[in-house]
Image: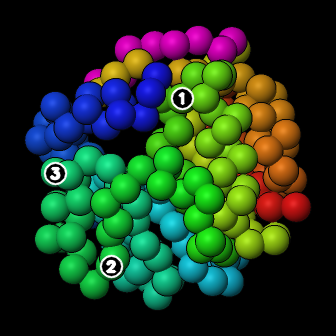
């Protein structure tokens, strides 16, 4: 699915999705147990791609990390900037990273690649590798399952990726996978990888 189609789908449902996501991270959010320890391993700037309402960018900044958000949906950028005024939120998409001279120590892709099918994901992962410093860290969360398949998501079509297929795609983009987590009883999965 084209990036502009994804952006339009989110923009058309922005208010409802913002209410569902919230703009701050709950103290009880279980994802803190993954994202916070990962951020502690990053020695420099973190880019939160598909930052949405800015909840994770704002949370990591409050913990003392140098973080910026990248988000293509106007309404989300407005919410993020209003809620987390000390954090820089760039209005832009993954396509804006292509050919960029900027380099990051860490990239957080928390459910921000879920709408990319097998024809689109490899190029995006390669772009993320290009903008990461050598040995920079990538944290990707996604929906996993026993087969690669599309499914209905509240915004637009998303994909479930078998862990082995996502791991392979990340490795082919120039990363070394250092950790992977998936409980087959549920769809939520994440992978940590280093740019090599």
Label 2 crowding class (10 Å Cα cut-off): few <14, some 14-19, many 20+? Answer: many
Give whichever of 122, 155 is nearer the camera.
Answer: 122
Drawn side of residue 81 relative to residue 143, left or right? left
Q: Is residue 47 above or below residue 157?
A: below
Callout 3 secondary element: helix
- Badge 1 or badge 3: first in the primary sequence: 3
Residue 187 lies left or right of residue 161; in this view the side is: left
Residue 18 on image: x %, y %: 19, 46
Q: Is residue 76 visible?
A: yes
Q: Residue at x 41, y 80 (%)?
A: 61
Element type at mark 2:
loop
Q: Residue at x 82, y 70 (%)?
A: 135
Tag 1 residue: 116
Mark 1 to mark 3: distance in Å?
22 Å
The residue range painted magenta reads: 147-154
Q: Is 146 within the magenta?
A: no
At horizontal 70% and vertical 35% (from top left) the residue drawn is: 122
Label whose residue precedes the other's in the sequence (2 or 1): 2
Q: In the rendering, which numbered label is found on residue 87?
A: 2
Give the residue at mark 3.
75
Is residue 153 highlighted in magenta? yes
In the image, residue 178 sits, relative to residue 8, either above or below, namely below
Which x, y percent locates residue 21?
Answer: 26, 46
* 59 up-or-down from 17: above or below: below
Toward the viewer: 92 or 62? 92
């Amino acid at each position: 699915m084209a990036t502009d189609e994804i952006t339009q789908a989110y923009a058309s449902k922005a208010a409802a999705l913002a209410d569902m996501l919230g703009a701050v991270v709950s103290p009880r959010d279980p994802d803190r147990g993954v994202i916070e320890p990962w951020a502690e391993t990053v020695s420099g700037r973190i880019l939160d791609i598909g930052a949405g309402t800015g909840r994770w960018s704002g949370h990591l900044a409050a913990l003392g990390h140098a973080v910026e958000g990248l988000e293509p949906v106007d309404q989300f950028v407005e919410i993020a900037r209003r809620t987390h005024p000390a954090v820089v939120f760039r209005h832009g998409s993954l396509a804006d990273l292509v050919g960029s001279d900027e380099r990051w120590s860490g990239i957080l892709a928390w459910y921000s690649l879920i709408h990319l099918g097998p024809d689109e994901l490899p190029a995006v992962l390669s772009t993320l590798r290009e903008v990461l410093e050598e040995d920079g860290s990538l944290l990707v969360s996604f929906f996993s399952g026993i087969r690669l398949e599309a499914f209905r998501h509240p915004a637009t079509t998303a994909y479930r990726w078998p862990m082995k297929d996502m791991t392979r795609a990340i490795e082919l983009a120039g990363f070394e996978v250092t950790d992977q987590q998936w409980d087959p009883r549920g769809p939520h999965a994440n992978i940590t990888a280093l740019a090599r």
